[in-house]
């Protein structure tokens, strides 16, 4: 038992060391076009500019907040932003090792400590300057936490209120990062609720699950709504998020009028629904 424990610790150390080494090498990469824009917007937000009024972009605010936190905590240079991302992925790796060891995917426990190499390590090895520190990669951390917490609270029924509060908060973070991930979140919740109804009851969802989840979801959302109301940019946010869409990928700043249906059809949301709804219905 002592030997096994020492082996697990050694493998964890090697795994995190390898990820750190690759991440440090990747930190020398210059920021890509999108990432450079995110840094500029985050710096201007830090200087007091108003998002969607003084600074235009059709993206949700989550990615700008990530860069703002990175710049405030470490610095605004390319290397410092990438170092913040490295810390982000190391935290994800530690949580992966901790959370997945109880599932016994492998006969030898130390194999669980190697999993971050095949997730974070593969990401670092394949990511170019355009892929590093992009939302589509970063969002996998909260998405994983949502799935893990849903499974954990369903099986253990421990700390139910706090867990569903955290799940709701993470859902709010994901939605405020990119609306296109809403169908993915929806599929997670539907599957969770189906199993809850099958083995518990619908009343359990109403009493135990939805109230803390809604409260948690409203925490980040209320901050954003408060920001919108304070700076009186309600019409801008509605137009940018719902009524208009980019004219093309080559001219992302030029927007053309589009109702909710046309905006939906011209975005990745339609593709996601076609991918997720058939297996969900099955």
Image (tube, rainbow, N blue to C red):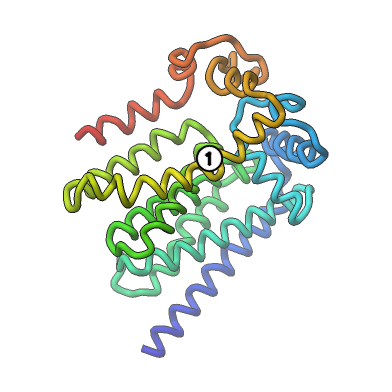
* Of residues 126 and 74, the one drawn nearer to the viewer in this rendering: 74
Question: Which residue sits at x=46%, y=85%?
Answer: 6
Residue 81 lies, in percent from the top left, at 71, 50
Question: Which residue sits at x=45%, y=19%?
Answer: 264
Residue 94 lies, in percent from the top left, at 51, 66
Asked which quadrant contains residue 84, the reply is bottom right
Asked which quadrant contains residue 194, the reply is top left
Image position of 147 (left or right of 257): left
Residue at disc 1, secondary structure = helix
Image position of 16 (left or right of 236): left
Quarter of the figure that contains the C terminus: top left
* Of residues 130 and 34, the one drawn nearer to the viewer in this rendering: 34
| Residue under pointer 1 | 136
Residue 192 lies, in percent from the top left, at 29, 47
Q: Residue furthest right?
A: 47
In the depicted structure, whether residue 195 falls above or below residue 11? above
Image position of 178 (left or right of 234): left
- Dot 1: within a 10 Å radius of its alpha carbon, few (fewer than 14), some, or many (20 or more) residues? few
Question: Which residue sits at x=41%, y=50%?
Answer: 212
């Amino acid at each position: 038992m002592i030997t096994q424990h020492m082996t697990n610790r050694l493998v964890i150390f090697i795994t995190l060391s390898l990820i750190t080494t690759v991440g440090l090498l990747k930190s020398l990469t210059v920021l890509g076009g999108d990432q450079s824009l995110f840094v500029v917007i985050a710096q201007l937000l830090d200087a007091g500019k108003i998002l969607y009024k003084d600074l235009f972009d059709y993206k949700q605010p989550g990615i700008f907040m990530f860069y703002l936190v990175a710049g405030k905590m470490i610095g605004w240079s390319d290397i410092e932003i990438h170092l913040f991302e490295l810390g982000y992925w190391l935290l994800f790796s530690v949580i992966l090792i901790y959370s997945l060891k109880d599932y016994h995917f492998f006969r030898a426990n130390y194999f669980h400590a190697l999993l971050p190499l095949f997730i974070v390590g593969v990401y670092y090895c394949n990511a170019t300057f355009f892929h590093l520190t992009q939302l589509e990669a970063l969002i996998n951390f909260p998405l994983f936490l949502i799935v893990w917490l849903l499974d954990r609270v369903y099986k253990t029924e421990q700390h139910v209120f706090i867990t569903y509060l955290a799940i709701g908060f993470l859902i709010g973070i994901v939605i405020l990062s990119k609306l296109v991930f809403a169908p993915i979140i929806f599929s997670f919740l539907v599957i969770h609720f189906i199993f809850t109804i099958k083995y518990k009851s619908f009343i359990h969802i109403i009493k135990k699950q939805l109230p803390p989840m809604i409260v948690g979801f409203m925490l980040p959302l209320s901050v954003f709504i408060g920001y919108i109301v304070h700076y009186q940019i309600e019409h801008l946010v509605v137009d940018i998020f719902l009524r208009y869409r980019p004219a093309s990928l080559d001219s992302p700043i030029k927007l053309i009028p589009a109702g909710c249906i046309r905006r939906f059809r011209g975005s990745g949301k339609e593709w996601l629904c076609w991918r997720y709804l058939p297996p969900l219905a099955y």
